[in-house]
Image (tube, helix red, strand yellow):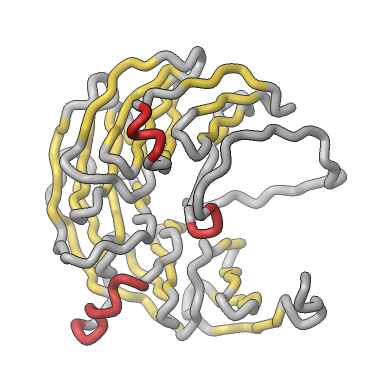
Amino acid sequence: NSNKILNYSGNLENLSTFKFSKFDNFNIIDTELVYTENGNIILSDGKGTIYKLNNNLKLIWKKNYYSKKEKKLSPILRFAVKNNSLIVADNLSNFYLVDHLNGQLNWKKKNTTSFNSEIKIYKNYFYLVDYENILKCFSISNGDLVWQYQSENTLIRSNNKISIVLDDENVIFLNNLGDLNALNLKNGNLKWQTPTRSSSFLENTFDLIYSDLVLNKKTIYFSNNKNEFFSVNSKNGNVNWSQNINSINRVSIIDKLIFVISSEGFLVIIEKNQGNIIRSNSIFRNLKIKN
């Protein structure tokens, strides 16, 4: 989940537009799109239709693998791409594999409960977390379950999308209770677990929102909407440092600096190794309220 530094030297012009069926409650749905290796775009609409567009937003293909009943439930789709494989998982418990070259369905299966996480791929496997806080490893070739790990569950279901990162040995995820878990990629054995919330805060789990995890040089960075920002060692789960920063936005890291936008509209710059705040500037200060 670490974005690379990009240099942009073009003009921000509206070159083309592509319209599709709207999402209900779009402002609270964490929709996404993905890019293939040659720059094509894959996205979905509010009825579960998958679109593949070229970089000029011209339609290459569109497919929908949902029944009329499922379409009325406005499925939310998550994507991951590797080679010609497009892995799709949704909040209706479906997960399936599509050939992204032509949109044809290879296989489709049903989970015991809905998925609420990113999809991450390692070799011939992919990883998902469902609403019961179970991380599952599936085979890309046929969708069979390889192994699963049950982290602590709760009766309260948060709509916060669960974030996953991979390193050379582990799959690391943050469940909706705030427990950071590291598992062996191949067999699912627990390497370490680090709670980031005290028991006194468990009743507030429903409105707890975390940012995406960012893995940078054996350190994981993330924050939440409870004024907590963490730096955690990815090898043993030890907390390196924490700061009082309120943010649900994925951080950006450049060399020895961390850049994060707080929920109050401040651009905060943090020293990466020690966690010291270097500066904090309001990005709304010179904006009118209507903007």
Q: Is residue 236 visible?
A: no
Q: Nearer the viewer, residue 241 or 196?
A: 196
Q: Nearer the viewer, residue 208 or 18?
A: 18
Residue 32 picture location, percent across and down: 52, 44
Is 40 situated above or below 230? above
Residue 69 picture location, percent across and down: 33, 33
Is 21 situated above or below 149? above
As drawn, is 54 to the left or to the right of 65?
A: right
Residue 8 picture location, percent across and down: 78, 47
**Residue drawn at point x = 35 percent, y = 51 percent:** 164
Quarter of the image holding residue 251?
bottom right
**Residue drawn at point x = 60 percent, y = 71 percent:** 261
As drawn, is 228 to the left or to the right of 44?
A: left
**Residue drawn at point x = 26 percent, y = 45 percent:** 114
Is 39 situated above or below 214? above
Q: Is residue 278 visible?
A: yes
Residue 76 picture location, percent across and down: 42, 43
**Residue drawn at point x = 63 percent, y = 28 percent:** 39
Is 101 situated above or below 110? above
